[in-house]
Amino acid sequence: MRLRMAARLVRGLLVAVSATGLAASAEAQDKAQEKKLKIGVIYDLTGPLAGGGSELQYTGARIMLDQYSAKDVEGYKIEAIYADAQSKPDVAINEAIRLIEQEKVDMLLGFFSSAQCVPVAARVEQLKKFMWITTCISSAVLENKNYKYVFRPQASGDQFGMMTMDFIAQNTKEKLGKDPKDLRVAIIHEDGAYGVDVAKGNEAGAKKAGFNIVLREGYSATAPDLSALVTKLKRAKPDVIFHTGYNPDITLLLRQAREQGLKFGALVGHGAGYGVYEKLKEGLGADVNYVFNTDPISIWLANQKSMDPKLPPIIKAVGEEFDKRKPGIAIRSAHVGMAASNTYLFLTDVLPRAIKKYGGIDPDALRKAALDTDIPEGGTMLGFGVKFHGEGSPMAGQNERSFPVVIQYVDDKSYVVWPKSQAQREAVLPLPKGATYSNQ
Amino acid sequence: MQAFLDIFDIYLLEAVINGILLGGVLALLALGLNLIFGVIDVTWICYAELVMIGMYGMYFMVQYYGLSYFVAAPLTILLVAVLGAALHYLVIAPLLTAPPINQLLATGGVLFVLQSFATVAFGIDFRNLGIRLPVLAFGDMNFSYARLLSFLAALIGMVAVYLFMTRTFTGTAIRAISQDRQIMALMGVDTRRIYLITSALGGALAGLAACLLVLQYDVHPFVGLSFGPITFLICVLGGLGNFIGGFIAAFVFAEIISLGGLFSDLEWGYVLAFAFFIVMMFIRPAGLLARRR
């Protein structure tokens, strides 16, 4: 009897032990199989750049990453680790290194400010990690650097500057009633990598169009006073002002321009602060009416008829999620869609290819996958296609198919007015009579 | 010759007058700091952040609680005065006898605390009071009404503080404390009270600056970065504790920025102003109006 009981006990124990063992080995197997891509995400959540658009970019990227962290990409879980660059290049570098060395992220994504992008890209390339830039536009980030691991689907700064000049050049005679050589243009910009680069594009475009550049000047985005610049603009009497700035320097300049009675025919902005309509409206009131802005197209304004049919539902979902996170915003900022689209591009095109075709998520696999990307126009939410300049090209890592568009704010709505293929309406040019800054 | 004469146009005059008006803004900012930094020899590196808190006070009172500007302004001045007194009581008082570097580091810490507090409490958005003042036009020249108000406030503030310091017992006691902290207690003066009054007064002047700056600038947690360093330089250039010197220094600085910016790049205006400061520190280390020894 006792023997039988002992045998039963031993049998029971054996079953328990083997069951535990099996469970443990299954768990170990699961762990081994749980593959994960850790993405370090860096934007400015504090400091002046946060309100200038960086926090909106963060929101756009986060909407997409949150969605994908809930599901796998080719068997890989997505884990995003967020860091705040505090609007300071040194903090951006330190955070990038911390994420790579301590948090052991597989790659970096994000970056709003060109002043941060330039040094961070150099450092990340040194560390042979993969970097996916969603936002910063300065050509200086990639020009003649021949980086292997840094990629930017976003249009570059000189493309911004050239695009706006092209827009004005095509409208000079018809709308402004002048010969190009008689058109007086002023190019003003914040003096960081971003402003300088766009202004470089502006200047090249102005020379190509044959405009008369009456003033070209940079200023510090934190300058407490811009009245001397306004006085110089009054003296130079430009027909069109091309401006690149963050915020609050844009509102300071335009407020002082109103107070000092500056008049002009058109004001063309280039992203960053000009992309945050709510803040412009709050600071300038009705004066913001008819101002132009240049940016990658807002995903909510992009021409959906010529777009890959799988994208419109995603655009709708991003918009709904944004409205939930930031209720009560009149115009959904282009910043949000820019980061969302570029993040989506990585998660749905580059990453799956790296895993399937190149066997994993190491920097070389991601790099090869990015170089294989070949998306025609209309294949992204931003309307443009994607093909990266390869090694040996002066702009290695830059998307050669991206382009910005010119939009105009009219009565609390934004409309694409250039290029013609994307235009939703004719541009109101020059500023109509009665507008605060109108020179009519 | 004609090119040279062309410089003397209406825009030059406008730049000169704009320089004077900018000088008013800077003089207003320097007034309170001069009292604290210059007279009682306490270093408030976070002075511009007190102004920032005052600007937020104005914004919320006017925009959220619907108070009129003229009701909100005295409340803001009171708020920042209390903040100034609290800063002294909590941070400076325990460090009064410590080396000045400790005060500098402690108020430097307060600077980051206030910036972070504003970021957490109010967010990173730029906020605008939404009051648009009319523009003053004289022929082709136009000027900011808000800046004219700042100029007048700075002028009246400077005269009032000067009279207070020279004509009242408390003012005399404040000046005396700056000469010898220890001996004043032996003369029957309650030094703790005097420090507290001076700090509250310094805070109130920061509050006054906030009321006028909020008409010209957006409020955000880092607005102090644009003004902090330049305000310190003006106090030093004018001669620490010398209100008339500080007033003049603000206008000299502003004119260099304005005219330098008109004749060259805007950035050069600031470079020239700072270069002028360095040179003056060699020639007149005790300030513009210091007597030669």
Image: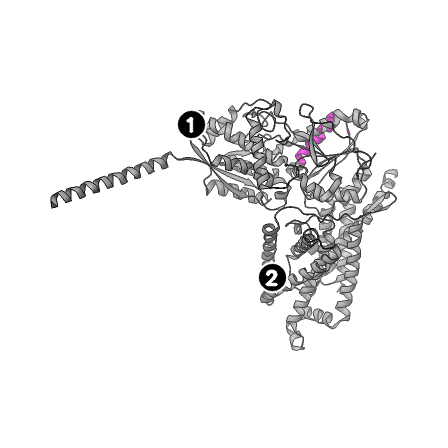
Mark 1 packing: few (<14 Cα in 10 Å), some, or many (20+)?
Answer: few
Cα separation, mark 1 vs mark 2, equals: 59 Å
Q: Is residue A339 visible?
A: no
Chain bearing mark 2: B
Specify the label residue B194 is tagged with. Answer: none
Disc 1 residue type (three-letter): Gly
Split into 4 quadrants, where in the image is the N terminus of chain B?
Answer: top right
Magenta part of the chain: A196-217
Q: Is residue A201 magenta?
A: yes
Q: Is residue A190 visible?
A: yes
| Residue receiving disc 1 | A359
Q: Residue at x 43, y 33 (%)?
A: A76
Dominant secondary structure (helix, strand or loop) of the stretch shown in magenta: helix
B84 or B241, which lies in front?
B84
Split into 4 quadrants, where in the image is the C terminus of chain B?
Answer: bottom right
| Residue receiving disc 2 | B103
Q: Are marks 1 and 2 in contact (CB under 8 Å)?
A: no
Apparent side of residue B79 relative to residue A131 in the rendered image (left or right): right
Residue A143 x, y percent position in the rendering: 60, 30
Disc 1 secondary structure class: loop
Please name which of the two marks, 1 or 2, marks the residue nearer to the observer.
1
How many discs mark residues in the rendered view?
2
Query: Which image quadrant is residue A198 in?
Result: top right
Mark 2 packing: few (<14 Cα in 10 Å), some, or many (20+)?
Answer: many
Disc 2 secondary structure class: helix
Disc 2 residue type (three-letter): Gln
Both marks 1 and 2 on one chain: no
Image position of A67 with respect to B278: above or below: above
Residue B65 x, y percent position in the rendering: 68, 54
Residue A52 x, y percent position in the rendering: 64, 41
Chain bearing mark 1: A
